[in-house]
Amino acid sequence: MNLGWHRLATRRADLLAKRISPHLPRAGRVLDVGSGTGHNAAALRAMTNLEFAEADVVDMHTVGNGPALFDGHRLPFGDGEFAASLLLFVLHYPDDPLQLMREAGRVTAGRVLVLQSTYRGGVGLALLKFREFWLGRFAFRLARITRFIGRVPCPLRPRRFWTREELIELGRRAQLTLREVVIETSPGHFSGHRFLSRDLFVWESSPVP
């Protein structure tokens, strides 16, 4: 069972890494905020020459060295410590997503990459909530029952869901500069969907004095 979990997580991480890696710097350290099982950072390490650090509110890692734990509000790193930071399907969970975006900008001297599912209209919101339950809380509990991850508290309780426009406004309020929004176009579950999308937001942090 755990081998099956690992293969699924590795395949998903490889697909995400292929999408994200063209937007990463060529050198420096990168922070993965909300690193989960560690598969995303592992895939990006294998695909680039970058050094990756991880941070999360609980330690559920199954690959890599595990995350630096934080309270969901203040990242335990210095200003401008990283060349880039990643928030991959994270912003629907924190109590204060604006604060987390500001923190990502604070510890980053370059790009803040946000990959997030977004919805359009009431149908899209309903579909996204359904998908989040099965691939979020239900999958987490099943992974914990099968001991793929340890007996840690579930951090996957959505506080809100986002439209593309709302996330653009969130980044603006966090004082980040939007470079581009890359909408998923490759074949897959979300491709061409009228109501759902997985958007990659490429933000630039203000230079640290």
Image: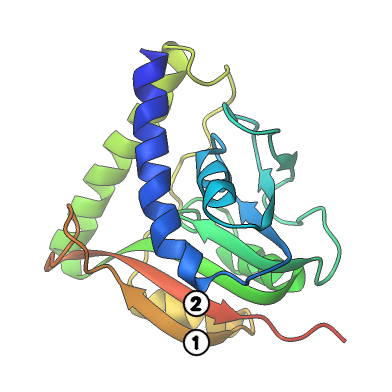
- Amino acid, disc 1: Arg
Q: Residue at x 74, y 40 (%)?
A: 69
Q: Nearer the viewer, residue 64 or 120?
A: 64
Label 1 neighbourhood size at 10 Å, few (<14), some (14-19), many (20+)? few
Which of disc 1 and disc 2 is earlier in sequence? 1
Element under disc 1: strand
Above or below, comparing residue 194 to residue 208 in the picture = above
Q: Residue at x 67, y 81 (%)?
A: 205
Do labels 2 and 1 touch, CB within 8 Å?
A: yes
- The quarter in which the C terminus is drawn is bottom right
Q: Is residue 139 left or right of residue 144?
A: left
Which percent across, then down, holds residue 160?
41, 57
Q: CA distance from mark 2 to mark 1?
A: 5 Å
Above or below, comparing residue 61 to residue 119 in the picture = above
Q: Is residue 55 left or right of residue 48?
A: right
Element under disc 2: strand
Label 2 neighbourhood size at 10 Å, few (<14), some (14-19), many (20+)? many
* Residue 34 visible in the current orientation: no
Q: Residue at x 64, y 57 (%)?
A: 49
Above or below, comparing residue 139 to residue 158 in the picture = above
What residue is shown with label 2? Answer: 202
Which percent across, then down, holds residue 35?
58, 44
- The quarter in which the N terminus is drawn is top left
Q: Residue at x 38, y 24 (%)?
A: 5
Which percent across, then down, holds residue 154?
52, 30
- Amino acid, disc 2: Val
Which percent across, then down, holds residue 67?
70, 39
* Residue 32 visible in the current orientation: yes
What residue is shown with label 1? Answer: 179
Above or below, comparing residue 169 to residue 51 in the picture = below
